[in-house]
Structures are given as C-alpha cells and as structure tokens.
Image (cartoon, rainbow, N blue to C red):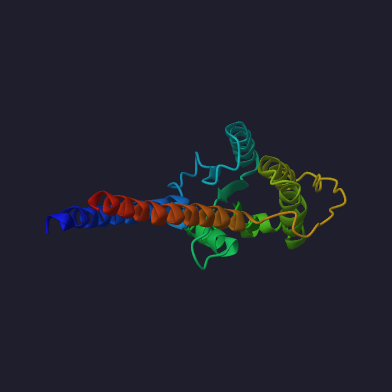
Amino acid sequence: MTYFAPIKQAGLRLKSWLASTLILVVAITCMAAPAIATGLYDLPDFDADNVWVVDTADAISSANQSKLTKTLKELAGETGQEVRMVAVRRLDYGKTVDSLAAEIFQDWYPTAQAQANQTLLVLDTLTNNVAIRTGDSAQGLIDADLAESIVDETVGYNIRKGNKYNQAFIEAGDRLVAVLSGQEDPGPPIMEDEIQIEGTFTKAEDTDQGSATVWVIGFLIVATIIPMATYYWYVGLGN
C-alpha cells in the first residue's frame, strides 16, 4: 500500500498543476485578445470649450493634437464654425464609423441650433473607415463632393500610403479650415500611382487576431506538455 502513496501525491499535484494552468490560459487569452471596443460612452466627457481632438487610438502625436487644437479654436473664434476630430481604435460590435459619428454628433450637439455650425470627423483606425458629419450651416460650405474628397483623397490616401494618421488629420484640418473660413479649398494631396499587390498588406484586425492565436496556441502546447511531464516524473519517483 505504501508504494501507491507517491502516485496519489502525484495525482494531487497534477490536479494543482492543471488548475494553475487553466488560470494562466485564461489570463493569457485575455491579454492576447484585441483592444477593447469603443462606443459613445467610452469617450471622454465633452467640453465644448476645450475638446477639439479626441484620440483614444493614440493615432495622433501630442504635438499635432496641440497644433490642430490651436487651429480649430482660432477657426471657431473667427468664423463661429467649429470642427472636431475623433480617432478610435475599434468600434463596438454591430457599429459602423457612420453610426458612431451620428451618435457623437447627436450627443455633443443635441439640438438643430447647436448642430448648425458643427463639423465632425471620425476615424476608426482598425478598419480605417472615416465619416464626416455636418450641421445645416456648415453643410452649405462643405457639400457632399467635398466631404467625399476629404474622406477618400485626403484621409484615405494618407492612410493607404502607410497609415499616416498625423498627416491625414493635419491635411484634412487644413482643407476644412480653409473652406469654412470662406477661402479656396487647397485640394487633396498630389496622388502618386497606387499599385495594389495582393497579399502585401494585412488588415490590423487580421494581425491582432493572428498574434492572439499564436500566443494562445503556443501557451496551450506548453500548458499540455508541462503537466504531463510532471505527472510522469512523479510516477517515476513513486516507482
């Protein structure tokens, strides 16, 4: 009977190992999971006097946020037209950048009068989709063609050239400020030929998911081998 005591102890220790391994697997899975999604109520509280750029995606440098804030505040002071820019990392399930922009616009400017002179640009850096919302007065200056050009030929172009988010926001800001000030639209950047090579670029979502999968699979392999090796080692000691 005494010969089975080490095996019994090994079994108990194996159970302990398995429990610890399960906890670690859950922890690793959580750490490897993609970034938390962003919805309206995940954004900072809106302060009309101080909030001009909201960047929860860390896409815009501090220097460029300051530059944009200064430019947009000056525009508001000189013309009454206000522009705000928002960058998020990931949208809530079922949301689009257009639906988020609509929610932000309605929440920040709840009445038609409050919305009249407002322009809002929202970017989701995971999908690289962009939306522009304008109030009635601003819409008289920023028509659908101009908004589409800013989205595709300014923001979109800079993103396609290597996720140049800083340049995208600065150049979009320059165009919006010029038009809302009554000046001529400086137009989009000069576009170089864009050659699309299939398989060259990977979406951020694919990269995030791929990294998470590699981490989890690698850890599961280790988590399986170590308890088994430990079990047989203890059994060997018992024998």
Q: Is residue 59 above or below residue 34?
A: above
Q: Is residue 88 visible?
A: yes
Front residue of 84 and 55 = 55
Q: Position of residue 202 (x, y in %)?
A: 68, 55
- Residue drawn at x 44%, y 46% is 44
Image coordinates for residue 192, horizontal then vertical, percent: 86, 48
Q: Residue furthest bottom?
A: 94
The residue positioned 71% from the left and 41% from the top of the image is 167
In the image, is residue 148 above or below residue 230? below
Residue 173 found in image quarter: top right
User: Which residue sits at x=37%, y=52%?
Assistant: 229
Percent coordinates x, y for residue 7 in the rendering? 21, 56
Classify residue 105 as left or right of residue 230.
right
- Let me know if residue 108 appears in the view: no
- Residue at the left extreme? 1
Going by the image, does 71 lie left or right of 34?
right
Q: How many marks?
A: 0
Instruction: Name which residue lies at 26% across and 49% down.
Output: 237
Using the rendered view, name the quadrant where residue 204 is placed.
Answer: bottom right
In the foreground, 220 or 229: 229
Q: Nearer the viewer, residue 68 or 157?
A: 157
Whole-percent x, y for residue 194 in the image:
84, 53
Residue pushed farthest right? 193
Tell me the quarter of the image containing the N terminus. bottom left
